[in-house]
Image: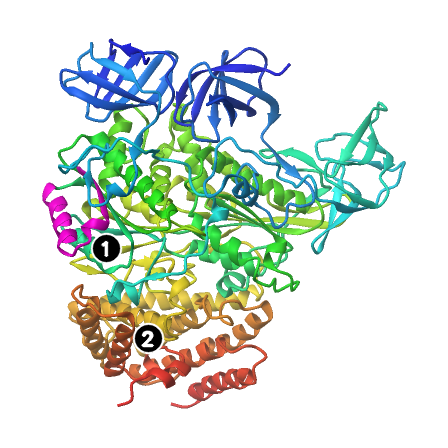
Amino acid sequence: METTGKIVGVNGNMITVAFDAAVAQNEVGYACLEQGGTTQRLMSEIVRIRGRLADMQVFEDTRDVQIGDVVSFSGNLLSAELGPGLLKQIYDGLQNPLPQLAAQCGFFLQRGTYLDALDRDAQWMFTPAAKSGDRLTAGETLGTVPEGIFQHRIMVPFAMSGVYTVKSLAPAGPYTVTQEVAVLADADGHDHSVTMLQRWPVKLPITCFAERLKPVDTMTTRIRSVDTFFPVALGGTYCIPGPFGAGKTVLQQITSRYADVDIVVLAACGERAGEVVETLREFPKLPDPRTGKTLMDRTVIICNTSSMPVASREASVYTAVTIASYYRQMGLNVLMLADSTSRWAQALRELSGRLEEIPGEEAFPAYLESLIANFYERAGLVRLKDGSTGSVTIGGTVSPAGGNFDEPVTQSTLKVVGAFHGLSRARSDARRFPAIDPLDSWSKYQSVIDKERVEALRSILRRGNDVAQMMKVVGEEGTSIQDFIVYLKGELLDAVYLQQNAFNDVDAATPAKRQQEMFGVIEKAMLADYPFAKKDTARKFFQNMAQAFIDWNQTPADAPEYASRRDAIMQTTEEASRHA
Amino acid sequence: MHKVYHTIDNLSGSIITLRAEGVKYRELAQVTSRAGTSLAQVIKLSGDTVTLQVFAGARGIATDGKVRFLGHPMRVHFSDSLLGRAFTGSGSPRDKGPVLTDNLIEIGTPSVNPAKRIIPRNMVRTNIPMIDVFNSLVESQKLPVFARAGEPYNPLLARIALQAEVDIIILGGMGLKYDDYLSFRDTLDESGALSRTVMFVHTASDPIVECMLVPDIALSTAEQFALQGKKVLVLLTDMTSFADALKEIAITMEQIPSNRGYPGDLYSQLASRYEKAVDFDTAGSITILAVTTMPGDDVTHPVPDNTGYITEGQFYLRNGRIEPFGSLSRLKQHVNKDTREDHRTIMDAMIKLYSAFKETQEKQSMGFRMTDWDEKLLKYGMRFEREMMDLSVNIPLEKALDLGWQILADCFNPDETGIPSKLINTFWPKK
């Protein structure tokens, strides 16, 4: 018999339920709402238990809920369905497929409608990989099915602990996700039927791998200021805090297109619906630069936008990271982008407020920091039990109130990430995109260029900025020509290397090889000595250089002018440093 | 049929509590007392204690006041007979027209499935260069105007409403001065647009709860028109009053405030309204232009700050001009690629140079010597402000782009502008 309870209080999306038998923290229950002869079941999760009363957050609008309505508990924690067919999907925070929901309910989301995350009718060509008699543990491969360009591994379900003996395996052929593909016997000789579908509680990390490794290799994004100056490693974590309008989302969209990974999981968490729509309408048309298929073939979108229920916003980042970790178990490199983690934190704040917990800074709950740390710790490069490696890289945007980084979410995030791409309002106002602040940002990962060379140019940027600050006080005439040239060098580096025109097809994405070539050219221009006597001559020279660089940046690498434009820049540098 | 309750236990601000049974969350009730009759909405249930928010405020409600629950949530009338009419925040007529009680729709309904949205594609031409050239307004966009109190934001809204090609205009006024309401009405009337306008206006002297209802009523009405295939423009002014009403209620409810007294769910509250902006695949659209006044001209104040994260850009109105810095239309790239090939370049180049002009101006004000380059920038900046930024400029996009090239050519050499050579060759005005 299932456990039930009765509603004794309603406050916003929080209900208080008196229950009669054992329930668990974070257990999922359904509030049953009688309306016009039909019953609507509203999914809820227990967030606190006090005596015989459980506080539950409802993942839906609570309109029309009454005192005395029945809640039936499911006995399960909030879980994600894992199996072939996740790729190309668009889910809400509770893993309801949105297109199917639209087909059923029309324009508007209808509460209480829950659909299967994975298509129950689709058939997948299963090829067994294990043999009868093999002794396996959770996460080891039983067989594979092709999913798009990937070999999707069907594994021993992650929730099964201990060693199992393969008793029988289904022969190669088409199966649906709910058909039995293997029977495993545990140590006591009990049989367990295994299908291609497994469920995993989203708030727990998946740990069925051999060991965690240190992230080393750069995950190239084709954004010059990221790859060269503030790189991200495969299996690493990074955050992008910035005020509104600084280009966080555009930066993530570009990353999701060009990042050198196998699979991208996008969590649009509490942000604008319009931005997700761009992704979901364009990705099916855009070619994946790595495989030639469409970008959608390697993407999973979890979309819980700002006007969708707050509680499922909190669930959405966990659903996303669970799916990302699932594909990591197949030896793939997965990038998970969360936009924005602040909205997730705000969902926690709303919940905490309704629970009347003692508030921490800016009314965020005191446990915010440990939740953020736990979340980012789910990234990582791992060696799987079969010796191959897989990674989950997590990039989260942060939307600090007032653009001030001294707020709890930004600060808690900075403590636990490996790279910080701080966006600045000053840069975005001046249309200097990407607006990653070259002075404040940092990264602990390996760049596509040697560290010393990058540092040399960064120091020019820093000195150029110092001169610019000084010039504001003493004016141009009070600045020596040497300092003035440093300032112009910094401006040039910024204009032609750090800044990228996202709307120009060529300039928008610079592959690592081209970055290395470009870096060589700009480095030469930066380190050269220019014996200019007059500031106007110097300014003129650097303006011309910028023009030449921009023309080169917008030239495709296979165009005939490519080499000549590059050589022209090098020659100009050389001549100017020799003469005058 | 509906039971009437006669005992009210607590009264505080516009919140009352009483004991009642069989009440649904968000249900509507009628509260009758010496002060008159008002609607109220259930905002909390705890055991048999029901908390109600009284639309007209609790002033004058007696402890023996009558409360009758109506069994349904807030609903308003919807039909074409709304056009040309004005209502209060609770949906009763503000003009002398009849009360409309049939054909009711619920307000504050669920959001649109993101999978049913489409990428916005139509530019809304306003003939204001600072909008058309630099930050194009797009159908289905939600865009606030950030301004200090006292800036001419309401006339700007009215002007955009009149010049934009839309089928229906819906005005949601919150905390509006009575004079402002009248001038909106007169402006719309004079241009003959009143017959395609519906107004839901809460004036500063009306009860605070009605202020909170205005966006929901206005947007639910807009949604119905849009579903009929109409292009709807919703004007909301001023959303800061709405947020302040939320704050007032939250504090009365003894909720823990998060930032400057505003409730922790301010973001979600604002978002659920703004996100009603939509372009339906097979029907009409809703475009939202809202005013958010910035207390103390401070954009980091919680209301403009949260708004900026929700909306698709913002216009800063300062000293009667739309500021190029900070103002942003996030959807412009969907439409400005198809207008004219030089549109984006002019947009970027002119702003970069204007930003350089601002730096020079700062230098000048500190008394530094001006170089030749500075002189050029100064000349450019003055012309840009006079010929582009001024709100009285009323020219179509193409004329504005030509004007942009002309100003650049009058002030600079081509290679000083950072414009790719290809476009210089085509568009640079020949002397």
**Between A472 and A267, which is closer to the camera in this rendering?**
A267
Mark 1 Cα shell of 10 Å, populated few (<14), some (14-19), many (≥20): many
Picture quarter with the C terminus of chain B = bottom left
Amino acid under label 2?
Answer: Phe
Q: Chain of mark 1?
A: B
Label 2: chain letter: A
Q: Is residue A316 visible?
A: yes
Q: Position of residue B140 (x, y in %)?
A: 36, 53
Q: Is residue A51 magenta?
A: no
Residue A46, percent from left and from top: 52, 23
Q: Indicate which disc residue B422 carries.
A: none
Residue stretch rendered in magenta on the structure: B178-202
Number of marks drawn:
2
Reply above or below: A156 against B61: below
The numbered dot on residue B161 is 1
Quarter of the rendering containing residue A486: bottom left
Disc 1 residue type? Answer: Ala
Left or right of B77 in this view: A293: right
| Mark 1 vs mark 2, CA separation in Å | 50 Å
